[in-house]
Image (cartoon, rainbow, N blue to C red):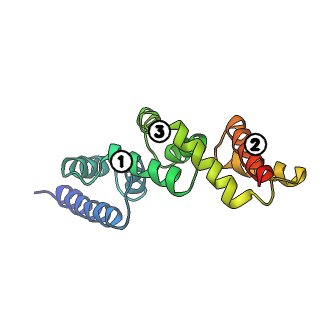
Amino acid sequence: MSFLDEENDAEYQRAKKRATYLLGSHAYSSAALREKLLKNYSVETTEKVMEDMLRYGFIDDEDYAKRLASALINGKKYGLRRAKAEMRRKGVPEELTEQTLSEFDCEEMTDALTDLVRKKYSDKITDREQRQKVIAALARRGYGFGEIKEAITSVLEEINES
């Protein structure tokens, strides 16, 4: 075994150890993990480690995408647009993002938006100026203006009835 082989093997071991350390603290998409490894290791070593991580099942982009989408939509109450942007930023492939987000029920998301407006913004939507700020905040969360208008109208009707 030559000096270069030993050096490459040592680099591979360090990269593999780093990858398992990173994956032990939280989940990564394959693209995000590859990007982290490339900062410190050669392309050849990184690809070899990535193959191992995929083969051993330490990386599963489909499962990662489902968990991330659920956390963004159900946990952080993001709309589809924001969830899509966040998933893209985290390295989830476009096709997988589309497929994963299409599994979420639009009616459930509309109900969730209405609940969010009711719980967090019901005291602000009666004032026209404050309502514009609420609309902007919800748009930043990734909701469309049609969805926002529908949710606000629904909550305003509830307020007027009581």
Q: In this view, does 128 lie above or below 25?
A: above
Tell me if 159 is positioned left or right of 65 in this view. Answer: right
Q: Mark 1 or 2 closer to N-term?
A: 1
Q: Nearer the viewer, residue 127 or 12?
A: 127
Question: Which image quarter holds the C terminus?
Answer: bottom right
Q: In this figure, which residue is indicated by the disc labeled 3? A: 101
Q: In this figure, which residue is indicated by the disc labeled 2? A: 153
Q: Mark 3 or 2 closer to N-term?
A: 3
Looking at the rendered image, the disc whose residue lies closer to the viewer, 3 or 2, is: 2
Tell me if 93 is positioned left or right of 24 in this view. Answer: right
Q: In this figure, which residue is indicated by the disc labeled 1? A: 30
x and y percent of residue 30 in the render?
36, 47
Residue depicted at x 30% and y 47%: 60
Amino acid carrying label 1: it is Ser
Amino acid carrying label 3: it is Leu
**Disc 1 secondary structure class:** helix
x and y percent of residue 20 in the render?
28, 63
Report whether residue 79 is seen: no
Tell me if 2 is positioned left or right of 157 in this view. Answer: left
Q: Nearer the viewer, residue 48 or 21?
A: 21
